[in-house]
Structures are given as structure tokens and as C-alpha cells.
Amino acid sequence: MRFWKYHGLGNDFVLVENFRGDVPRDPDFVRRVCDRRFGVGADGILYLEPSERADLTMRVMNSDGSEAEMCGNGIRCLAKHVYEKGHKRSPRMSIETLAGVMKVDVEVLGKKVSTATVDMGRPRLDCAEIPMECQGRFLDRSIDALGREVRGSALSMGNPHLVVFDPLSPEEMDVLGPALHGHPLFPRRTNVEFVKSVNGILEVRVYERGAGWTLACGTGACAAAVTAALLGKVDFDREVEVRLPGGSLWIKVQEDLSKVTMRGPAELVFEGRM
């Protein structure tokens, strides 16, 4: 089976073309492939598949064998692959995900895709849509983890997120990230973003659902920017730099919350067979 290894700011994926539906999506297969010592090694597997309502479909399996509704870094990698391999030789494409159909524009330099801009759709702020065991919006509210109270904001960017602006030490984050990720308020678990605003730049560290601490998370960067805009820490309708351990993404949040756009790079690392 042929595969390609991509990364978006160090958030890395094994991409497989599954047009015939013969590549397994079972958790054991995914965990073996993603194992960094005994497999190829990745944060997850991207499955490129046909679609009846978009140009193509992306399915995402996390390294622990669970499935994600959406992946912001992954969809940029998949768009790069789609363009460069000729599956859709157009700078604009539509990609179906479990979170809906996403529109992607790629920037091409010398026949290679350098960056991709993704229309991530609207943020979902109602607890029922996240999903979260609460009523209304969970915006700048307290949440308890391991006997420690922190303030956070929850939303969905196709997958659930909890954004925390509390000033915490790296050691506190190390403990609270896994605890908040599996908090009983989130029936499907959640991604957790610890955010600091510095001169209009958002510095973010992410504990990703299904993968743990990660160098970058596209939907997490979007969630951080949406929360920062709602709390008055950054401006709406302006591209904001979100700085992650693996590099920066640029996020713009519409003031009416109808759309969030994400711009960032994608890189091919190598290809092979297994």
C-alpha cells in the first residue's frame, strides 16, 4: 500500500488514497501505522476518498485509533496532495469532512502548494452543539479539574475545544491538559488550548484529543482566535497570528461569527510503501 507522510507545522500525518475503500480504518491498524517506533509514525492517518457532494472526502483517524470530525492541519496537507497529484488541478476545491464540506484555496508556487486557506465555517458556541453537558454558552466560566478551578471557554470548530487563558506554568499545563481533555462535561472528550495573548499574538499550547500534546492544531488555533475575539483580546475581521510550538497560523474571525478562515503551510516529508 502506497502512502505519503505530510506535516502542518509539525502536526504529522500518514496520507493514503482510499478510492477503492480497501484501506483499513480499524483502530488496531491505525495505532500500528502511527506508532513512532514500530510503524511509520504520525499523529494520525488521513484517508483521501471519493465524495458525492464535494470534490473529495477527508476522513481522519487519530493515533489512538479514534476518529476526528475535522483536522485543520490535516485538511491543508490533503489539499496540497490533491492539487499536486492532479486529483483536482484547481486552486479552489471543496473537501467533505464529518464536520461538513470545507472550501480550500491553495497558493501555488512553481507547481507546488506553499500555503492553503481554509473556510472553517462558523464556530458552534451552544453547549448542545459542542457537545457539552451544560446549557447555553460556556464562555469564560469556571471548570474544576483535579481540585483546581480554572476559567475556560468551550466551542466547536467541527470538533470540541476548551480554551483556557488562565496564567499557568508549563508544569500545571502538563497536569491539567489530560484532566480537562477527559472532563465529564465533555461526553466525546475535548481538545484543550492553553493561550497567552502577547502584543496581539496568541501563543497556544494544545493537548489534542486522540493524540496528546501536539506541535500544532489547526482547529485549536481557530478556537483560540474565536475565544480571544469574543473576550476582546483581539479584533474581529482581522487576521491574527496564532503561534504554536511548530510555527504560526493566521486566523480571521468574522464579527457576525458566520465564518472563520485559517491560513498556513503544508509540507510533504516523504512517500513510501507498507
Image (tube, helix red, strand yellow):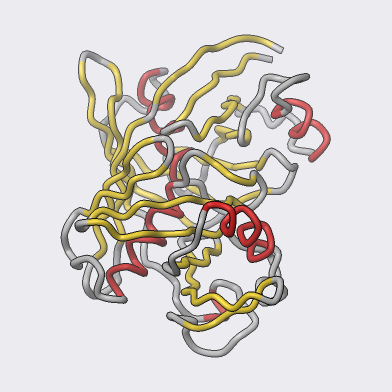
Residue 22, percent from left and from top: 73, 27
Q: Is 189 above or below relative to 7?
A: below
Quarter residue 199 falls in: bottom left
Residue 255, percent from left and from top: 21, 72
Quarter residue 87 falls in: top left
Residue at the image position 38 percent from the left and 19 percent from the top: 86
Number of marks: 0
Most foreground residue, 51 or 32: 32
Q: Is 131 above or below relative to 82?
A: below
Residue 49, percent from left and from top: 57, 35
Residue at the image position 73 percent from the left and 25 percent from the top: 33
Q: Is 16 above or below relative to 213?
A: above
* Quadrant position of the C terminus in the picture: top right
Residue at the image position 37 percent from the left and 19 percent from the top: 84
Residue 212, percent from left and from top: 64, 46
* Quadrant position of the N terminus in the picture: top right
User: Seen from this angle, which residue lies furthest right?
Assistant: 28
Most foreground residue, 159 or 96: 159
Image side of residue 93 versus residue 35, left or right: left
Image side of residue 104 versus residue 25, left or right: left
User: Seen from this angle, which residue lies furthest top?
Assistant: 272
Residue at the image position 47 percent from the left and 66 percent from the top: 163
